[in-house]
Image (cartoon, rainbow, N blue to C red):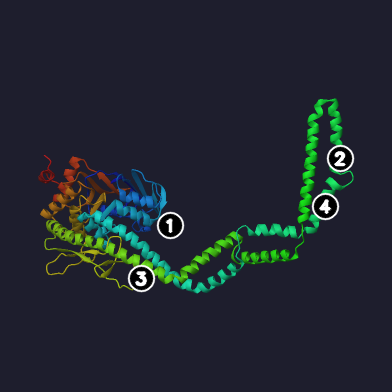
Amino acid sequence: MLKNLLIKNYALIEEISVEFSSGLTIITGETGAGKSILIDALGLLLGERASTEMIRSGAEKAIVEGLFAIQGNSRVADILRANENDIAEELIIRRELTNKGQSRCFVNDSPVSVSLLKEIGDALVDLHGQHEHQSLLRPETHIDFLDDFGGYGKEIESYQKFYRSLAELTSKKRELQEQEQQLKAKKSLYEFQIKEIDLVNPQSGEEEHLESELKILENTEKLNELTNGIHQLLYEAENSVRDGLVKARKMMEQLAEIDQTFMESVTDARSAEVIVDELSKQVQSYASRIEFNPDRLEEIRERLGALSMLKKKYGGTIDLLIEFRKKIGDEFRFAENFESEIAKLEKEIEAERKECGDAANIITAKRKESSVKLEKAILASIGELGIPKAQFVTLIQQRVVDRSANMLAVKVGTQLFEASANGVDHVEFFISTNVGEEPKPLVKVASGGEVSRIMLALKGALAQSDKTPLLIFDEIDTGVSGRIGQSVGLSLKKLSKHHQVIAITHLPQIAGLADTHFAVEKTETNKKTSTQLRKLDTEERVREVAKLMSGSEITEAGLKSARELMGIK
C-alpha cells in the first residue's frame, strides 16, 4: 500500500506531503483545484511519460516520491530480484524531472530505468482514469484477469513446466537451423584442417621432449669433450682428484692412529673416494652412449618444423592445437550428421508438443467455464453501476500455426496452435454499452468513466485473488448520480476491505463512505497559485459532503442530510 506521497514543484503544487491509510480514501475539491494534477503526479511516479511543462514556474526540477509497504508482495519482490535490487519491507520510489528535460528514476535511492519503474508501478498500483496504468485498457492483461477469477493456478503451473521444456527444445532447433548453412560452408574447410593436423598428429608434451633431444644431438662434440675432460680430471690425469683423495685419506689414517678423533674424518675421506669413483663411472657410461646421428637430427628438426607450422595456423601451443582439433572434429561430425540431429530434436519436440497441448487444453476448458461466470458477475455489477443495458463478452481464441512455421507451437488434437507461457488462448474483453450495438473491444469503445466502473465490477469479482495492493479511481462517477452513485460508493467500500482504494469524486454518495477524506484546495500567496491537499476531520467531512450535495452555500438542512448520508448522528 501507499504510505506516503511527496510532490514538489509539480504544476500548481509547490509542496505536498501526505500520509495515506488503508481502506477507502476519498479526495474531493472544486473543479480546477488540482485533483487531476495529483493523479498526473502519481502517473509520473509510476513510469508514465514526463513533460517539462509540468515543472512549477520558477523551479529547476519537480520531484514525486512515494513510500510503499511491500511486505508479502511477491510480484514486486520478483521484479526487484530479477533486476538485482535490494528487497525490504518498504520501497521508496522517486522520480525527478529537470527543466532541462532530464528525467531520473530511483528505487530505494538506486537509479533505475523508466521501463523498470513502470514494471514495478504496474505491480503496485492500478490507476483507473485516462492513464497508461489503467490495466483494463491493455488487452494483454485480460487473460490475467480471467485466470485470477478462475483460480486454476495449479493447472497453469503444470502447463508451464511442459512449456519451458518445449521452449528450450524449439530454441535449440532454431539455433541448429541457423547454423546449418554456416556448417555446410565450413565443412570442407574443417575436412582439410583435420587432415592437415592428423597428418602430423601432435601429442601433448611431445614438443618439449623433442627440443631436449635436439639439443643433445646438436651438441655431441661438446658433450664428448666435456665428459672426457671430467673423467681425466677426476680419474686418469696425473695428480687426479682421486689420487689426491687417496693420499689425503692415508695421511688421515696416520693421524687417527695417534688421535682417535680423526676416525670420523677417515670415514668421510673414504666416502669422498667412492663419490669420485661413481662420478667417473657415470661420465664414462654417458660418454659411451654419445653418438652423432644426422638422420635422427634431421627427423627431429622436420618434426619440430611441422609442429611450429601447425601452431602458427591453429593455436599458440600444442595443447591449444589439440583442443582446436577436437572442436573442429566435433563440428565436422555434427555437420555430417546434421539431418539426423534435427530429426532427433523434432521427435522430442513433437512429444513435448503433445504433452504441452494436453495441459493447455485443460486450461482452455477452465477459461471457458470461468468466462461465463465472469460475464454474469460483471453484468450484474455494472448494471447496478449505471450501465444497465450492457453486453460483456470474454472472447477466447486460438491461432492455428502452419506445421512448416518455425515457431513455438503446441499440439491440440491434430492441429498446432501458437503458444505462450499462458497457454494457447488469446483473451480479450468485448463490450456494448448501448442497446442494438454489437460488442466491440473494450479498449476501443468504453469511455473513461465506463472503463473505471467496469474495472470496479471486475475488481469486485476478483477481490479475493487480485494481487495489486492499491487501486486508484479517477472519473469513476462520470455520468452517474443518485442511486447509481450510491452503488458505486458501496462497491468501492466493499473493495477497500481487500485493497487500499483511493477515489477522486464529486458525488456525496461516494464521499460519505470514506474512511479518510482529503480536500484539494487552491490558494494564492504572493501572487502565486498553489494547490494543497488537506486531511479533513469529522466535522469538516460533513461540511464537504454537504457542499457536494447542495453547492457552495451550506445550510443546516444540508448538514443534516450529509450526516444522515454518512451515518453520523
Q: Earlier in the sequence, mark 3 or mark 1?
A: 1
| Contact? badges 3 and 4 (CB < 8 Å) | no
Foreground mark, 2 or 1?
2
User: Which comes sooner in the sequence, label 2 or label 4?
Assistant: 4
- Gap in Å between the C-alphas at discs 1 and 4? 91 Å
Instruction: Say few, some or many: other residues with alpha carbon within 10 Å of mark 1 (under 14 / 14 to 19 / 20 or more).
Output: few
Q: Kindly state the secondary structure of the residue where label 1 is placed.
A: loop
**Residue 541 in view:** yes
Q: Amino acid at mark 1?
A: Lys
**What whole-number distance in Å separates the C-alpha atoms at marks 2 and 3?**
93 Å
Residue 406: mark in rendering: 3
Disc 2 to disc 1, how far (Cα)? 98 Å
Above or below 55: residue 189: below
The amino acid on which the numbered mark 3 sits, given as a three-letter code, is Asn
Distance of mark 3 from mark 1, alpha carbons? Answer: 47 Å
Query: Which amino acid, mark 2?
Result: Gly
Which of the two labelled residues, at mark 2 and mark 3, occupies the earlier sequence position?
A: 2
Q: For mark 2, what is the residue?
A: 244
Which numbered disc, 1 or 4, marks the residue closer to the eye? Answer: 4
Element type at mark 3: loop
Q: Position of residue 24 (x, y in %)?
A: 21, 46
At which x and y percent is residue 45? 34, 52
Question: Is 214 or 27 nearer to us in this picture?
Answer: 214
Secondary element under disc 4, as helix, strand or loop, is helix
SS at circle 2: helix
| Residue nearest the viewer, comparing 187 with 508 | 187
Asked if disc 3 and disc 1 are in contact, CB closer than 8 Å, the reply is no
- How crowded pointer 3 is (Cα within 10 Å; few <14, some 14-19, many 20+) is rated as few
Q: State left or right for residue 323 relative to residue 178.
A: right
Tell me what residue is drawn at x 18 percent, y 57 percent: 453
Mark 1 sits on what residue?
A: 100
